[in-house]
Image: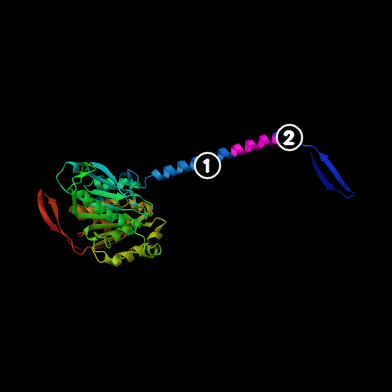
Amino acid sequence: MTALVYRDAIDWRVVLYIKHPESERGMDIKMKKVLKIIGILLLCIIAFIVVLLIFLSKRQFVAKDYSEKTETGGTIEANYMKRGAYEVSYYEEPTMQGFEKYEIYYPTELKSKDKKYPVVVFANGTGAKVSKYHALLEHMASWGFIAIGTEEEYDWNGFASEMCIRHLMKLNEIQTVDEKENIFYDKVDFDNVGITGHSQGGVGVISAITVTEHKDIYKAAVALSPTNKELAKNLEWEYDATKVSTPIMLLSGAGGGDDWVVTGEQLQDIYQDIDARKVMMRRKNTPHGEMLYSADGYVTAWFMWHLQGDAEAAKAFVGDNPEIMDNEMYQDQQRDIKVIDSVSVQKDNTLLKTRISRS
């Protein structure tokens, strides 16, 4: 029983009323239904978040068919954007490092052929473990390279890249791994090693070729949208491009809406710091994230030229009419190719030696 007291203009009055048990049970039932609905909604939200996290954890940053769908603007670019002629296999090995494991794509024929294969190391961007873009390594291996990377998520200092080199050196020297035949024994061509990386990984490329123990092993490098110097300093990822002596290509996006990672002026600033063979260009209407793969035709051609002596690939960058200078999908093209080694050119069934110099 509940008493309700109120006052009117005349006097105090007390009104008594009784809550019926049936009314209380009805209220309880309604409350339970509301709580049940809320619980179901919360479970649905939690389930959605879990599914979303699983999806994001497995989502690839680079589609497996990117080489078929990415638009190109030049014949050479299109040719090297295609998959190469080699069948490809995959190998991984765990390690007691923060980056968990080494991941390697390689030409399948390596298992049986008595020859050495050139190497391309992949440095990761922020949060972009190499397992998120296996398609790029597989593509590179299809052109005859051993492509190696790790699960490192903070690759600015070149440490993981240095460990990749050390690991390949180890694999090249031992005949067995875990009592099994080591397929990489005496198969690694350390005279032809390159490195590429995107964003923070672009900083990692510059660090790898300037400050790591095996910095001099690199014969060619590609930095894709490397973090600008001011931002890198604020993030304590400082690097010094004036120390670069390795032939390097700088690429970034233009007009993609997030050029703040490295604007045209900031990329030019890095380019001017470098006193080595160098190329710079920006791909039009390409967001920062898409630069991870959008220019892969030229990235592949760069390594094919420097690490495999491919004269056709070289024509994209040097000679009287290099393709990059006329490719309408790019802007701000610059090149400073001071000295070019002799390369072999097959012409009319005759092997010629051609020296290509800067025009």
Magenta stretch prevailing secondary structure: helix
Between 49 and 144, the one nearer to me in the picture: 49
The quarter of the picture where the N terminus appears is top right
Of pointers 1 and 2, the one earlier in the residue sequence: 2
Q: Where is residue 96 in the image (x, y as percent from the top left)?
A: 32, 50
Question: SS class of the residue under badge 2?
Answer: helix
Between 148 and 86, the one nearer to me in the picture: 148
Q: Position of residue 268 (x, y in %)?
A: 33, 64
Label 2: how many Cα within 10 Å (few below 14, some 14–19, many 20+) = few
Question: What's the mark number on residue 23?
Answer: 2
**Residue 161 is at least partly visible in this image:** yes
Colour theme: rainbow
Q: Residue placed at 74% from the left, 33% from the top?
A: 21
Q: Position of residue 170 (x, y in %)?
A: 22, 51
**Residue furthest top in the image:** 22
| Residue 27 lies within the magenta run | yes
311 w.r.t. 178: above or below: below
The amino acid pointed to by label 1 is Ile
Q: Residue placed at 37% from the left, 45% from the top?
A: 60
Q: Splitting the image into 4 quarters, where does residue 157 fall?
A: bottom left
284 to the left or right of 8: left
226 w.r.t. 103: above or below: below
The quarter of the picture where the C terminus appears is bottom left
Read off the residue under disc 1.
Answer: 45
**Residue 199 is at least partly visible in this image:** no
